[in-house]
Image (tube, rainbow, N blue to C red):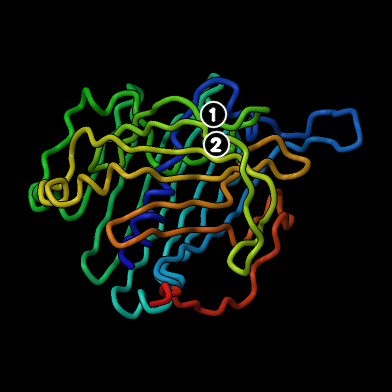
Amino acid sequence: MRHAVSLATGFLLALPIAAGPAFAAFSQDSDPPTAGAQAIQRLHSADLSFGVYALGSKGVEFSVSAERKAGRLEMATAMRTAGMLDWAMSFTMQGQVEARFEDGTLRPVRYDIQSDGSWSKRMTRMRWGDDGLPVAEVSPPNTEDDRDEVPDHLKLGTVDPTTAIFARALREGAEPPCTGSDAVYDGRRRYNLHYAPIGPDMVEPHNRTAYSGPAFKCVIRSEPIAGYDRKYLASWSEKDQQPTYIWLVQPPGFSVWLPVQMEGGFRLGSARGWISRAKLNGRDWLAPLGFIRAEMPQLPPP
C-alpha cells in the first residue's frame, strides 16, 4: 500500500513544464470572443481532487488547485493517506507555490512543501533569483539524508514539481501535451521526465471515478539525474523505471487538458487513481463522489 503514496506523489511530478503558448489558459483576464454553439472559456481557476487505490481499497487522497492573480499563478497541493493505509502509516503533505507569467512562459517564484508521516517529517522551501537559479532550504538537510547536493549547473532550466503540473496539464490546444522531455528539481532531487502519446482510450464508469468517457492516454517515464538517496536508488531503481500512465480530457467549453485517471506498477501489483471532483472557474465540472465502499481483490479460482 505504500506505493499508493508513491503513485500520488509521482503524479504530482509527472506533468512537466512546456514553454510558449501553453500558458494561454491562465494568461488572459477575460474570456476571448468565440463564435459557434459553445464559447471557449479562459480558465481562471481550477480545483481538482483524486483518490488513489491499491490492493482493493483507497490508500491516498490528494488535491491540486490554482488561481490566477495579477499576472501570477498561485497553486496549492494537499495529500493524505486514507483507510487502512492511514492506520498503518499515516502521511500528510501540504504545499503552497507561486509562479509568474513572463514572455509567454510560467516562471517559478516560490515553492513551499511540508510533509509529516509515520516514517519521516520533511520540509522544502525554494526561491528563485533573477538569474533563474533555485535556492533550496530543506529539512532534514541533505548531509543527514544520505544524498549528495545537486550541483548548480544541473538546476538551471528546471522547474518545481507543482509549477510543472499546471504548465503542462493546463495547456491549451487540440493536441494533448504528451510529447517531449523536461527537467524537474524538487529541492533535493534532479530528474528528467520523458513522456509520449499512446492514443485515444476510454475511462470506464465505476464508483471510484467522477468522470467516464473518452480520454487520451499518455505514458511518463522518469530518469534520475542527481540528489537521490543512495539506499533508495540501490533498492528501488528498477521500480522507479516503471512507467506511469495518465489519461487526459478536455472539459466541455475549455481547451485545456486535465488528468482524470492514472496508473502505475510496483513489485506487488499496481495502483490506480481517478478524479473524484473538479471545479473550474468556480463551478462544478465533475460533482464530488459520494461514499465509496472498500473492495477486496478477487482471487483466481483454485
- Element marked by disc 2: strand
Looking at the image, which residue is at 38% across and 31% down?
A: 194
The image quarter in which residue 5 lies? bottom left
Q: Which mark is residue 59?
A: none
Q: CA distance from mark 2 to mark 1?
A: 6 Å
Q: Nearer the viewer, residue 37 or 273?
A: 273
Q: Amino acid at mark 1?
A: Phe
Indicate left or right for 183 with 166 as reference. left
Percent across and percent down for residue 262 are: 49, 51
Q: Residues within 10 Å of mark 2 (few under 14, many from 20)?
A: some
Indicate left or right for 300 with 44 as reference. left
Indicate left or right for 46 with 190 as reference. right
Percent across and percent down for residue 202 are: 64, 48
Looking at the image, which residue is at 34% across and 80% down?
A: 87
Q: Are marks 2 and 1 in contact (CB under 8 Å)?
A: yes
Q: Nearer the viewer, residue 32 or 58?
A: 58
The image quarter in which residue 296 lies? bottom left
Percent across and percent down for residue 132 are: 34, 25
The answer to whether 171 is drawn above or below residue 123 in the figure is above
Looking at the image, which residue is at 25% across and 58% down?
A: 122
Disc nearer the start of the sequence (2/1)? 2
The answer to whether 60 is drawn above or below residue 216 in the figure is below
- Element marked by disc 1: strand
The answer to whether 171 is drawn above or below residue 93 in the figure is above
Q: Which mark is residue 72?
A: 2
Given the current orientation, which residue lies at the most extreme front position? 302
Q: Amino acid at mark 2?
A: Arg
Looking at the image, which residue is at 69% across and 31% down?
A: 28
Q: What residue is disc 1 on?
A: 101
